[in-house]
Image: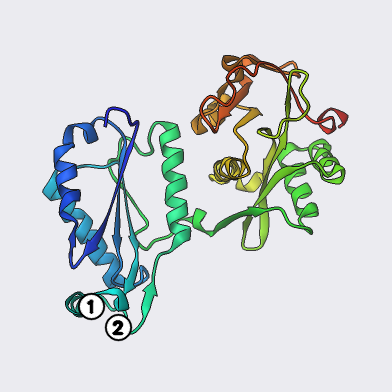
Amino acid sequence: MDDFDAVVVAASIIIGKYQPYIRQFVRRHAAGLRGRPTAFISVNGSSPESLPEWRAAATRYVDTFLKDTGWQPRWTASFSGALRYPRYGIVTRWIMKMISRQTGGPTDTSREYEFTDWNAVDQFALDLAAGLGHGGLNRSRGPVRQGTGSRSPMARLHVRPEQPGDEAAIAQVTDGAFGQPDESRMVDAIRRAGHPAISLVAEEENTVVGHILFTHVGIGSSLPLADVMGLAPMAVLPVRQRQGIGSRLVQEGLLACAGAGCHAVVVLGRPEFYSRFGFRPASGYGLRCEYPVPDEAFMAIELVPGALRGRTGLVRYLSEFGDT
């Protein structure tokens, strides 16, 4: 366990109990778990999360397990799983039917049921990643429950790729955030030029409230590189700033970059904000910004360890960045 900065333990409820080896693991590694950020994820598939009976049972299972083991994880989450009646043996099928009936769940054993709220799972993962970037959410308040049937305001937020027809909304958000049209004109110019880019919007109740853009950059004399991108610009409606939308955009944007084969990202911005996601001064990688900015304001992150090793020099953005 010494090789890990944080530990997430996930366990499922099987006929009213967690797997014995989960309990054994927690007890055996009690000292290691106390020495680093930890999270416990409980999966109970007997009924949908929306039922009060499920929420009560989920809380009881987690509380009992933590009391028995003496573990105090910084984060806990409970999610509903699935009922696979046709796959169970006759005894397990009958027991699961009885448990599901007690918690208000389905009892038709000829069917399978999927209850997991994957949006809540995704949000917990993003919150956990952000918390670890911070050095831990709610450090002074002990374990934080999430995913036990109550949805946070951020759960209404949907981050998706830009689509045709979003242009005006993106411009409105960007102009409002920067107080001038230069950045939105730059985004329009990049779009018109057809440069490969990752462009995401944050949408709430069919209204675009945030936008983030990643474009390829060059290093030294190299043309824009396929595996290195620059984050710029990012914008959130002024009335929705400081509510976690920017963090969500950065998190999902980095995931999208990694999924597109990008190995590193650079950004020009506030260190106190971007450092929480793993960015650090780009000068530490031997990189310099083509614009005259403070050293600490130009940052980079390796999405693949070692991606920037040996790639030093001046980072150059697309020409559209300098044309506005």
* Residue 33 percent across, percent down from the top left: 23, 36
Give me the residue at 60% from left, 25% from top: 300
Label 1 near label 2: C-beta < 8 Å? yes
Give me the residue at 18% from left, 36% from top: 29
Please, is residue 234 above or below residue 307 in the view? below
Describe residue 170's horizontal placement relative to residue 83 as left or right.
right
When asked about the image quadrant of residue 196, the answer is: top right
The amino acid pointed to by label 2 is: Thr
Q: Quadrant of the C terminus?
A: top right
Please, is residue 207 above or below residue 272 in the view? below
Instruction: Name the residue beneath numbered marker 1.
Output: 93
Marker disc for residue 109: 2
Residue extending farthest to the left is 68
Give me the residue at 68% from left, 55% from top: 208
Give me the residue at 64% from left, 28% from top: 266
What is the crowding at mark 1: few (fewer than 14 residues within 10 Å), some, or many (at least 20)?
Answer: some
* Residue 28 percent across, percent down from the top left: 14, 39
